[in-house]
Amino acid sequence: MYLDYFGLTEKPFSIAPNPEYLYLSERHNEALAHLTHGLGESGGFVLLTGEVGTGKTTVTRCMLEQVPDSTQVAFILNPTLSELELLASICDELEIEYDHQNATLKTLTDRIKERLLNNHVNGRHTMLIIDEAQHLAPQVLEQLRLLTNLETNHKKLLQIILVGQPELQALLRRNELRQLAQRITARYHLLPLTLAQVDAYVKHRLKIAGGRQILFDRAAVKQIHQLTGGIPRLINLLCERALLGAYSAQVNQVSKKLVTRAAQEALPETLPSQKNNGVQSRGKRFAFTLGGVMMLFAVGIGLSYFI
C-alpha cells in the first residue's frame, strides 16, 4: 500500500533472499574472506557461525558465486539426519547412484569416495555445505570427519563448510570431536551490524527499491539498531512495519516514535524493558489509587470519631 506513497518500485525490506538487495557489510566481507581463504587451504573443514538472522546464508551465497564451475557442490539444508541418511543425502546432492533398498554406511561411503577420486582425476573439486549444522549429532559429525580421510599428498578431496548458530562452537568443543576440531582450517563468527552499518544497510535497500535514502531520520535509525541488536532479519521486519506506520500516519519520514510503535507490533519480544516499565507504571498507579482510597477511608473514620 505504501509503495506509491514513498515512490518505491517494490518492498525494500522483504525477508525473501533476493540477491539484488544483497548488502555486504565490512563484517560480511571479512567473513567471506575467511571462508575463501579456508577453502584455498589443504584442510577439510571451514566453520561459519553467527546468531539467527545475522547473514550467514548471505555470506554462503556470495561464496558460492565465487566457486569455479569445476567444483561440484552438495548443499544439505536439513542436518537432523542419521549417519546413513546424511550419506544418502550427500549421494543425492552429488547425483551418485546407489541401491536405495540395500544401502549401508559402507556402501554409501564407498560410492562417495569413488566420486571424490573421479572428480580429482578429472581436475574437479568437491564441496559439501551443511546449513544449521548445530543440529548435527556427534556421531554424524564423526562420519563427516571420516569422509575427509581421503586425501592426496597435497590436499583432502572433500572440503566441508559447516554453517550454524553459536551452539555449533560448543558442540565442536566436545572431547569426542576433538579430531574434527583440529581439522578446521578457518573459522569466523559473524557479529550483528553496528549502528553505522545499520544506517548503510537501510539506505542501501531503499536505494535498490527506487526510493529516497532518507526515509528514516537519524533517531529512527538509532532506535532500529537498539531494538534489533543489528540483526539484518529483524531490521527488515521492523523497517517494513515502520514504513506501513508512516504511510498510515501520512508522514513522509519515519521517526523514532514510529519505529518504537512498529516494534511493539512486529518485535514484541525486543521490548521487555518498555513492557516492564509499563507494568510497573500501571502497578504504581494502582498502588497510588489504592493508597488514596485507604487514606480517604481513614480520614472518614477519623472525622466520624471526632464528630
Image (cartoon, helix red, strand yellow):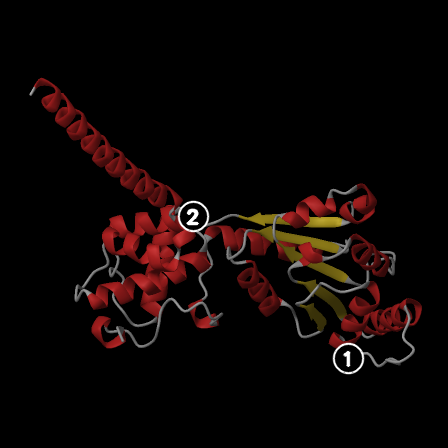
Crowding around mark 1 (Cα neighbors within 10 Å: few <14, some 14 to 19, many 20+) is: few
Comes first in the chain, label 1 or label 2? 1
Left or right, 156 with reference to 207 = right
Q: Position of residue 289 (x, y in %)?
A: 21, 36
**Quarter of the image where one finds residue 207:** bottom left
Where does the image place residue 291, in percent across and percent down from the top left?
23, 30
Residues at badges 1 and 2 in contact (C-beta under 8 Å)?
no
The residue at the point 84 percent across, 61 percent down is: 147
Q: Position of residue 281 (x, y in %)?
A: 28, 39
Image quadrant holding the N terminus, namely: bottom left
- Residue plotted at (79% across, 52% down): 138
Give the CA distance from mark 1 to mark 2: 41 Å
Dot 1 amino acid type: Glu
Of labels 1 and 2, the one closer to you: 2
Up-down: is 145 above or below 122?
above
Q: Nearer the viewer, residue 234 or 57?
A: 234
Q: Which mark is residue 229?
A: 2
Residue furthest to the top in view is: 306
Residue at 87%, 61% (x, y): give it.
Answer: 150
Q: Is residue 298 above or below residue 129?
A: above
Residue 99, x across and y down, in percent = 89, 81
| 285 in relation to 254, above or below | above
Badge 2 marks a residue whose secondary structure is loop
Q: Is residue 123 visible?
A: no
Q: Secondary structure at mark 1?
A: loop
Q: Residue at 67% x, 46% y: name it.
A: 169
Amino acid type shown at disc 2: Gly
On residue 95, the disc is 1
Mark 2 Cα-neighbour bin, 10 Å: few <14, some 14–19, many ≥20: some
Q: Residue furthest left?
A: 307
In the rendered structure, the answer to whether residue 259 lies left or right of residue 100 reads left
In the foreground, 87 or 199: 87
